[in-house]
Image (cartoon, helix red, strand yellow):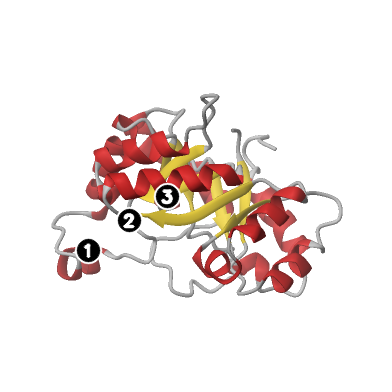
Amino acid sequence: MGYDVIIACDFSSKSDTLQFLDRFTDRKPFVKIGMELFYAEGPDIVREIKKRGHRIFLDLKLHDIPNTVEKAMRTLARLDVDMANVHAAGGIRMMEAAKRGLTKEDGTCAALIAVTQLTSTSRWMMNNELGIPGEVTDIVTAYAKNASAAGLSGVVCSPLEAGMIHDACGNQFLAVTPGIRFADSPADDQKRITTPADADRIGSDYIVVGRPITQTEDPVSAYERCVTEFCKQRSRL
Protein backbone atom coordinates (compact mmCIF):
# COMPACT_ATOMS: atom_id res chain seq x y z
CA MET A 1 0.00 0.00 0.00
CA GLY A 2 2.97 2.33 0.29
CA TYR A 3 3.75 4.78 3.08
CA ASP A 4 1.55 7.61 4.27
CA VAL A 5 0.39 9.94 7.01
CA ILE A 6 -3.13 9.08 8.21
CA ILE A 7 -5.16 11.87 9.83
CA ALA A 8 -7.27 10.67 12.76
CA CYS A 9 -10.65 12.34 12.19
CA ASP A 10 -11.77 11.98 15.79
CA PHE A 11 -14.74 14.29 15.51
CA SER A 12 -18.20 13.82 16.97
CA SER A 13 -20.28 14.79 13.94
CA LYS A 14 -20.46 14.63 10.16
CA SER A 15 -20.56 18.41 9.84
CA ASP A 16 -17.38 18.92 11.87
CA THR A 17 -15.59 16.20 9.91
CA LEU A 18 -16.55 17.43 6.45
CA GLN A 19 -15.82 21.04 7.41
CA PHE A 20 -12.35 19.91 8.45
CA LEU A 21 -11.75 17.92 5.26
CA ASP A 22 -12.98 20.84 3.11
CA ARG A 23 -9.84 22.71 4.15
CA PHE A 24 -7.71 20.27 2.13
CA THR A 25 -8.22 21.66 -1.36
CA ASP A 26 -5.02 20.44 -3.03
CA ARG A 27 -4.86 16.85 -1.80
CA LYS A 28 -7.03 14.10 -0.35
CA PRO A 29 -5.28 12.80 2.76
CA PHE A 30 -5.67 9.26 4.05
CA VAL A 31 -8.05 9.49 7.02
CA LYS A 32 -8.95 7.36 10.02
CA ILE A 33 -12.56 7.00 11.12
CA GLY A 34 -12.74 5.76 14.68
CA MET A 35 -15.41 4.78 17.15
CA GLU A 36 -16.53 8.28 18.11
CA LEU A 37 -17.43 9.35 14.58
CA PHE A 38 -18.67 5.96 13.37
CA TYR A 39 -20.97 5.49 16.35
CA ALA A 40 -22.30 9.05 15.97
CA GLU A 41 -22.96 8.95 12.23
CA GLY A 42 -22.96 5.29 11.19
CA PRO A 43 -21.71 3.82 7.91
CA ASP A 44 -22.98 6.76 5.83
CA ILE A 45 -20.05 8.89 6.99
CA VAL A 46 -17.68 6.28 5.56
CA ARG A 47 -19.53 6.34 2.24
CA GLU A 48 -19.50 10.15 2.11
CA ILE A 49 -15.79 10.47 2.79
CA LYS A 50 -14.98 7.65 0.38
CA LYS A 51 -17.04 9.39 -2.30
CA ARG A 52 -14.90 12.49 -1.81
CA GLY A 53 -11.82 10.50 -2.82
CA HIS A 54 -10.15 9.80 0.52
CA ARG A 55 -8.65 6.48 1.51
CA ILE A 56 -10.09 5.29 4.80
CA PHE A 57 -8.74 3.38 7.77
CA LEU A 58 -11.82 2.18 9.70
CA ASP A 59 -10.58 1.94 13.27
CA LEU A 60 -13.22 -0.06 15.17
CA LYS A 61 -10.89 -2.58 16.86
CA LEU A 62 -13.19 -5.60 16.66
CA HIS A 63 -12.72 -8.11 19.49
CA ASP A 64 -15.25 -10.91 19.98
CA ILE A 65 -15.74 -14.59 19.25
CA PRO A 66 -14.58 -15.60 15.75
CA ASN A 67 -18.07 -16.11 14.31
CA THR A 68 -19.27 -12.67 15.41
CA VAL A 69 -16.16 -10.91 14.12
CA GLU A 70 -16.37 -12.68 10.76
CA LYS A 71 -19.98 -11.58 10.25
CA ALA A 72 -19.22 -8.02 11.33
CA MET A 73 -16.28 -7.83 8.92
CA ARG A 74 -18.45 -9.15 6.12
CA THR A 75 -20.75 -6.18 6.67
CA LEU A 76 -17.87 -3.70 6.88
CA ALA A 77 -16.37 -5.06 3.66
CA ARG A 78 -19.30 -3.51 1.78
CA LEU A 79 -18.03 -0.05 2.72
CA ASP A 80 -14.90 -0.47 0.57
CA VAL A 81 -12.54 0.84 3.23
CA ASP A 82 -8.82 0.58 2.60
CA MET A 83 -7.79 -0.58 6.06
CA ALA A 84 -9.58 -2.11 9.06
CA ASN A 85 -8.50 -3.58 12.37
CA VAL A 86 -9.14 -6.03 15.18
CA HIS A 87 -7.58 -6.62 18.59
CA ALA A 88 -4.76 -9.17 18.44
CA ALA A 89 -5.78 -10.28 21.93
CA GLY A 90 -8.72 -12.06 20.29
CA GLY A 91 -6.32 -14.76 19.11
CA ILE A 92 -5.33 -16.36 15.81
CA ARG A 93 -8.70 -18.01 15.09
CA MET A 94 -10.51 -14.72 15.53
CA MET A 95 -8.06 -12.90 13.28
CA GLU A 96 -8.40 -15.60 10.62
CA ALA A 97 -12.18 -15.22 10.82
CA ALA A 98 -11.87 -11.46 10.45
CA LYS A 99 -9.78 -11.91 7.32
CA ARG A 100 -12.37 -14.28 5.83
CA GLY A 101 -15.14 -11.80 6.54
CA LEU A 102 -13.28 -8.84 5.07
CA THR A 103 -12.36 -10.73 1.88
CA LYS A 104 -14.81 -10.03 -0.94
CA GLU A 105 -16.17 -12.60 -3.37
CA ASP A 106 -13.63 -11.53 -5.99
CA GLY A 107 -10.81 -12.35 -3.56
CA THR A 108 -9.79 -8.76 -2.83
CA CYS A 109 -9.36 -7.63 0.74
CA ALA A 110 -8.59 -4.37 2.50
CA ALA A 111 -5.46 -4.24 4.62
CA LEU A 112 -6.37 -5.91 7.91
CA ILE A 113 -4.21 -5.06 10.89
CA ALA A 114 -4.27 -6.02 14.56
CA VAL A 115 -3.93 -3.80 17.62
CA THR A 116 -1.12 -5.09 19.85
CA GLN A 117 -1.08 -2.82 22.90
CA LEU A 118 -2.62 0.64 22.97
CA THR A 119 -0.12 3.48 23.07
CA SER A 120 -1.75 4.60 26.34
CA THR A 121 -0.65 1.32 27.97
CA SER A 122 2.41 1.46 30.22
CA ARG A 123 4.28 -1.58 31.51
CA TRP A 124 2.84 -0.99 35.00
CA MET A 125 -0.70 -0.91 33.63
CA MET A 126 -0.13 -4.03 31.51
CA ASN A 127 1.36 -5.97 34.43
CA ASN A 128 -0.88 -4.79 37.25
CA GLU A 129 -4.22 -3.87 35.69
CA LEU A 130 -4.37 -6.19 32.69
CA GLY A 131 -2.60 -9.06 34.44
CA ILE A 132 -0.12 -9.62 31.60
CA PRO A 133 3.43 -10.19 32.90
CA GLY A 134 6.64 -9.17 31.17
CA GLU A 135 7.78 -6.29 29.02
CA VAL A 136 5.37 -4.46 26.71
CA THR A 137 7.72 -5.07 23.79
CA ASP A 138 7.63 -8.84 24.33
CA ILE A 139 3.82 -8.91 24.24
CA VAL A 140 3.69 -6.63 21.21
CA THR A 141 6.08 -8.90 19.32
CA ALA A 142 4.17 -12.06 20.31
CA TYR A 143 0.87 -10.53 19.17
CA ALA A 144 2.47 -9.42 15.90
CA LYS A 145 3.69 -12.95 15.20
CA ASN A 146 0.16 -14.25 15.82
CA ALA A 147 -1.27 -11.65 13.43
CA SER A 148 1.25 -12.67 10.78
CA ALA A 149 0.37 -16.35 11.29
CA ALA A 150 -3.30 -15.45 10.81
CA GLY A 151 -2.54 -13.85 7.45
CA LEU A 152 -3.01 -10.23 8.44
CA SER A 153 -1.25 -7.34 6.72
CA GLY A 154 0.31 -5.86 9.83
CA VAL A 155 -0.28 -4.44 13.28
CA VAL A 156 -0.99 -1.25 15.15
CA CYS A 157 1.83 -0.55 17.56
CA SER A 158 3.82 2.24 19.11
CA PRO A 159 6.32 3.83 16.71
CA LEU A 160 8.98 2.80 19.22
CA GLU A 161 8.18 -0.84 18.39
CA ALA A 162 8.06 -0.60 14.58
CA GLY A 163 11.62 -1.79 14.04
CA MET A 164 11.22 -4.90 16.17
CA ILE A 165 7.96 -5.71 14.36
CA HIS A 166 9.82 -5.76 11.06
CA ASP A 167 12.62 -7.83 12.58
CA ALA A 168 10.08 -10.38 13.82
CA CYS A 169 7.67 -10.47 10.87
CA GLY A 170 9.51 -9.06 7.85
CA ASN A 171 9.62 -5.71 6.09
CA GLN A 172 6.39 -6.33 4.14
CA PHE A 173 4.44 -6.66 7.39
CA LEU A 174 2.98 -3.23 8.14
CA ALA A 175 3.69 -1.23 11.28
CA VAL A 176 0.89 1.32 11.60
CA THR A 177 1.77 3.67 14.43
CA PRO A 178 -0.31 6.17 16.40
CA GLY A 179 1.33 7.98 19.32
CA ILE A 180 2.86 10.62 17.05
CA ARG A 181 3.61 14.08 18.42
CA PHE A 182 5.69 16.96 17.12
CA ALA A 183 8.68 17.77 19.29
CA ASP A 184 6.90 20.93 20.49
CA SER A 185 3.50 19.25 21.12
CA PRO A 186 2.11 17.95 24.45
CA ALA A 187 1.98 14.17 24.95
CA ASP A 188 -1.67 14.27 26.13
CA ASP A 189 -2.74 10.76 27.26
CA GLN A 190 -0.19 8.88 25.17
CA LYS A 191 2.67 7.03 26.86
CA ARG A 192 4.77 5.42 24.10
CA ILE A 193 5.21 8.23 21.59
CA THR A 194 7.71 9.77 19.21
CA THR A 195 8.00 12.43 16.52
CA PRO A 196 7.19 11.90 12.80
CA ALA A 197 10.90 12.03 11.91
CA ASP A 198 11.81 9.43 14.52
CA ALA A 199 8.91 7.22 13.44
CA ASP A 200 10.34 7.27 9.92
CA ARG A 201 13.82 6.47 11.19
CA ILE A 202 12.62 3.58 13.36
CA GLY A 203 10.56 2.03 10.58
CA SER A 204 6.88 3.01 10.72
CA ASP A 205 5.02 2.36 7.48
CA TYR A 206 2.02 4.53 8.32
CA ILE A 207 1.72 7.08 11.09
CA VAL A 208 -1.67 8.04 12.53
CA VAL A 209 -1.81 11.65 13.69
CA GLY A 210 -4.80 13.26 15.39
CA ARG A 211 -4.65 16.23 17.73
CA PRO A 212 -1.34 17.72 16.45
CA ILE A 213 -3.19 18.22 13.13
CA THR A 214 -6.89 18.43 13.96
CA GLN A 215 -6.63 20.75 16.95
CA THR A 216 -4.48 23.46 15.39
CA GLU A 217 -5.46 26.74 13.77
CA ASP A 218 -3.90 25.66 10.47
CA PRO A 219 -4.39 21.89 10.08
CA VAL A 220 -3.26 21.88 6.45
CA SER A 221 0.14 23.32 7.40
CA ALA A 222 0.40 20.91 10.33
CA TYR A 223 -0.37 18.00 8.00
CA GLU A 224 2.24 19.15 5.47
CA ARG A 225 4.76 19.51 8.28
CA CYS A 226 3.99 15.97 9.38
CA VAL A 227 4.43 14.64 5.84
CA THR A 228 7.73 16.51 5.46
CA GLU A 229 9.10 15.23 8.77
CA PHE A 230 7.93 11.66 8.23
CA CYS A 231 9.48 11.54 4.77
CA LYS A 232 12.63 13.39 5.73
CA GLN A 233 15.04 10.46 5.43
CA ARG A 234 13.40 8.59 2.56
CA SER A 235 11.33 9.83 -0.36
CA ARG A 236 8.12 7.95 0.34
CA LEU A 237 5.11 9.94 -0.92
Label 1 belongs to which residue? Answer: 126
Query: In terms of depth relative to the viewer, which is nearer, 230 or 208?
Result: 208
Give the residue displayed 13% in from the left and 57% down from the top.
133
Q: Amino acid at mark 1?
A: Met
Query: In the rendered structure, which disc, 3 or 1, sits on the residue that comes first in sequence?
Result: 3
Q: Secondary structure at mark 3?
A: helix
Q: Position of residue 38 (x, y in %)?
A: 55, 64
Query: In the rendered structure, which disc, 2 or 3, sits on the residue that comes first in sequence?
Result: 3
**In screen coordinates, is 156 left or right of 64?**
right
- Nearest to the eye among marks 3 and 1: give it: 3
Q: Secondary structure at mark 1?
A: helix
Q: Position of residue 45 (x, y in %)?
A: 66, 60
Q: Mark on residue 237?
A: none
Q: Position of residue 5 (x, y in %)?
A: 63, 49
Q: Amino acid at mark 2?
A: Gln
Q: Secondary structure at mark 2?
A: loop
Q: Is residue 209 visible?
A: yes
Label 3 belongs to which residue? Answer: 72
Q: Please state, as top left, top right, bottom left or bottom right, where the C terminus lies in the image.
A: top right
Q: Position of residue 116 (x, y in %)?
A: 33, 50
Q: CA distance from mark 3 to mark 1?
A: 28 Å
Label 2 belongs to which residue? Answer: 117
Give the residue displayed 52% in from the left and 28% down from the top.
105
- Nearest to the eye among marks 2 and 3: give it: 3
**In screen coordinates, is 203 left or right of 95?**
right
Q: Amino acid at mark 3?
A: Ala
**In screen coordinates, is 197 left or right of 187?**
right
Callout 2 touching callout 1 (CB < 8 Å): yes
Give the residue displayed 40% in from the left and 51% down from the top.
160
